[in-house]
Image (cartoon, helix red, strand yellow):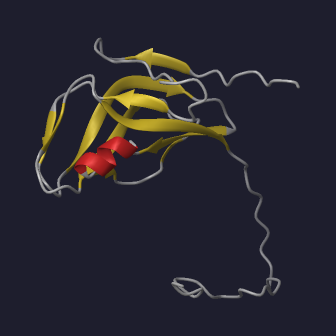
């Protein structure tokens, strides 16, 4: 079996208290992202959470920011635009839009895991305008067209 070389991501800390992303367990798909500041979210509120890091993701890849399942289940805390995409050309701070869907206020503290990031290969599409598209069994059916059963 030939193992592929790991994807190399260059990271710059822009806040002293930033924690570099890392895999919690061998074989995990996502790396944890950590807050560098304290926030209090009332039910229904959202906030842009600082991670204190910048990344150079290689061309042909993206970083997908996703919720932490434990925060979602226990507290109703999730990310607003899930998955959020960090494009390869972006060099600003990685920040996470977090929302409180729970019934109680939630405190995010500096050093807390607030999301996870997964890296995916991205295919660049080439578009061709045509007069007609091929027919399929599904056709234009969408938005519940397959039913709930």
Q: Which residue is farthest top?
A: 16
Place of residue 89 in the rendered image (x, y in percent of width and height, measured from the top left): 57, 35
Return the x and y of residue 55 as percentages of the image width and height: 50, 25
Outermost front residue: 149
Residue 133: where, in percent of width, then height? 79, 83
Pick the quarter of the image with the N terminus: top right
The residue depicted at 60 percent of the width and 86 percent of the height is 146
Q: Is residue 70 above or below residue 25?
A: below
Q: Residue at x 44, y 36 (%)?
A: 116
126 lies left or right of 19: right
| Residue 33 point in image, percent of width and height | 39, 30
Q: Give the left or right position of residue 14, taking residue 62 as reference.
A: left
Is 42 positioned to the left or the right of 11 in the image? left
From the viewer's perspective, tell me whether residue 128 is left or right of residue 103: right
- The quarter holding residue 18 reads top left
| Front one among 100 and 52 | 100
Q: Residue furthest right?
A: 1
Q: Nearer the viewer, residue 73 or 91?
A: 73
- Total tally of numbered discs in the picture: 0
Residue at left offset 14%, top offset 55%: 43
Considering the image in quadrants, where does the C terminus appear? Answer: bottom right
Occupied quadrant, residue 69: top left
């Amino acid at each position: 079996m030939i193992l592929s070389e790991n994807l190399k991501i260059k990271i710059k800390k822009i806040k002293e208290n930033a924690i570099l992303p890392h895999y919690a367990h061998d074989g995990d798909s996502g790396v944890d992202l950590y807050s560098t500041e304290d926030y209090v979210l009332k039910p229904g509120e959202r906030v842009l959470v600082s991670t204190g890091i910048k990344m150079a993701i290689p061309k042909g890849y993206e970083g997908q920011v996703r919720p932490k399942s434990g925060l979602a289940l226990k507290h109703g805390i999730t990310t607003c635009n899930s998955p959020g995409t960090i494009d390869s050309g972006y060099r600003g701070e990685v920040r996470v839009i977090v929302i409180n869907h729970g019934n109680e206020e939630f405190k995010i503290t500096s050093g807390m895991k607030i999301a996870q990031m997964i890296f995916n290969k991205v295919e660049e599409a080439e578009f061709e305008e045509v007069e007609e598209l091929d027919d399929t069994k599904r056709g234009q059916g969408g938005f519940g067209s397959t039913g709930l059963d």
